[in-house]
Amino acid sequence: MSHPSPTLDVLNQPPPLEDYNSYTSDIPLQEAVAREGGSWATEDLTMLGALLGSAEMIEHGRLANAHPPEARLFDRFGHRVNQVRYHPSYHVLMKTSIENGIAAQPWSHPRPGSTVARLTKSFLMGQVEQGHGCPVTMTFAAVPALRAQPEIAAIWEPRVTSWHYDGADKPADQKAGCTLGMFMTEKQGGSDVRTNITQATPDGAASGPGASYRLVGHKWFCSAPMSDAFLTLAQTAKGLSCFLVPRWHPDGTRNPMWIQRLKDKVGNRSNASSEIEYHGAWAQMVGEEGRGVRTIIEMVQHTRLDCVAGSASQMRHAVAQAVHHARHRETFGKHIAQHPAMANLLADLQLESEAATAVMLRLGRAYDEGHSDPEAKAFARIATAISKYHICKRCPSVLYEAMEVHGGNGYVDDGPMGRLYRDAPLNSIWEGSGNVIALDVLRAMSREPDAVAAFHAELTAVMGADRRYDAWVQQLMVELRDTSNLELRARRLVERMALAFEASLLLRGAPSAVSDAFLASRIAGDHGSELGTLPAGLDYAALIARGGCV
């Protein structure tokens, strides 16, 4: 006589978080969109949230990482082809992002709130998959640099601001839409691009901005090498200059940019990152000769904005997963979200996520306003660097704690938490790691008084709303006036500036339960060294409710 196995019944396991609307279920996100001028995009955001919360799209995100890109450097006869092959799910993700305007919206459809809407779309897309966002971000961010050379921008801007995706490896003039990458770092220098040794030689009698050159050299970290063109730095007789390098020469032949290998990275697996060599690659100079860093810095500024959005997106995804799990899993006779220690942790995680979301979209409004308002542009300059430092550094801690909520189930790769955690450090490292960004803030403070004044105005506009906040800002101003040992104190100063910025936004726009909890813990200092150490007397239930999905 056969007996059923008791293990056939699966008990006390939460359902997967899928088939939900990632926009309409996110209360703080919706509030921030309205507050920062993006309400007109509500219908599009709602439709996108429904698509991106679907089981089908979530599976595409998983597959793109489970089957990472593969380099095909030679054909079977030994000819150099320099191709990278991606899983079909990667192309689905790229198509979804490009066709929803994430690479183009503020440039192709400029209006108040266009950057707010675009960042929100990127934030939602990042909860499905982060790796493909790298080429999308670089394509978006390249436009200001291209505009430094109008005749080049006239050709390339329409291609990169198209809402059409064509992942084929063919010349750009045969495609409905193109993507752009950026190759800056070299193995001997990394962030110190002044040590770059790639050489640019005029390809004919003409030289200078807009002229053709040939590049010889290497680049050490080149993400998305199948992009249609790249902005890169190389040395000329007048110093480090910026160049546009297409994958295909204008005559229809492959440009000699040789992929050496793909990087084996900790995370970000769906995104191909490579090492490349230029073997006489054809390029055009963009911007003033010898001022390549200044030309490309606007691109860097916009990619740093997306680092903030990417980390905020990861935090939101992690908190949603943690709250979902805790509301369904039972221990000791009740759902684990109902246990006081877990409620404290979930509420603390939500505080980090909500503050990051508020910062992201406040920055978006500053970028929108900065097109016509110099003060807003100055504010965006320094606030982006401050936020990039702080939010990208908070992200790994949030993701680790969210993983721990799941226990052992969070540590296995059948679920999403392992991939989330491996991806978490990237945005802090990319486009300037912690020290580079903190020192960049100090540089802005010393060289850009308008940026400092704009940031000061942002903080002082909320003075009087809470005595704890007032004391924090007053002490911060004292510390900023102290010019002794600035580099040694850089990280601490930037962290305090970031916390003041977050607190100001929550005081302006969040419910009192949120702002009070943030002030009590982050500003008044009633918080431990780990998350989940909020003081007693706060409205944990209200905070957790803002972090849930279904």
Image: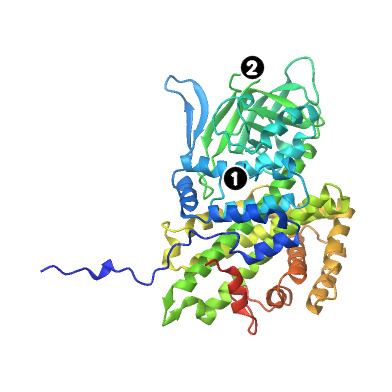
Indicate which disc, 2 or 1, sits on the residue closer to the N terminus. Answer: 1
Residue type at the position of mark 2: Asp
Residue bearing the label numbered 1 = 97
- Report the mark closest to the observer, 2 or 1: 1
Task: Report how far apart the C-alphas of labels 2 and 1 lie in the structure.
Answer: 31 Å
Looking at the image, the residue that sits furthest to the top is 205
| Above or below, 478 relative to 366 | below
Q: Residues within 10 Å of mark 2 (few under 14, many from 20)?
A: few
- Residue 531 is at least partly visible in this image: no
Q: Which mark is residue 251?
A: 2
Residue type at the position of mark 1: Ser
Secondary structure of the residue carrying numbered label 2:
loop
Q: Looking at this view, is 226 or 123 the one in front? A: 123
Q: Looking at this view, is 294 or 220 the one in front? A: 294
| Above or below, 447 relative to 228 | below
Please name the residue shown 78% across and 51% down the image: 112
Give the quadrant of the N terminus: bottom left
Q: Quadrant of residue 143?
A: top right
Residue 144: horizontal and vertical position, in percent?
76, 39
Looking at the image, the residue that sits furthest to the bottom is 537
Residue 541: horizontal and vertical position, in percent?
59, 78
Residue 243: horizontal and vertical position, in percent?
72, 30
Please name the residue shown 69% across and 53% down the image: 41
Residue 123: horizontal and vertical position, in percent?
62, 54
Please name the residue shown 63% across and 66% down the image: 27
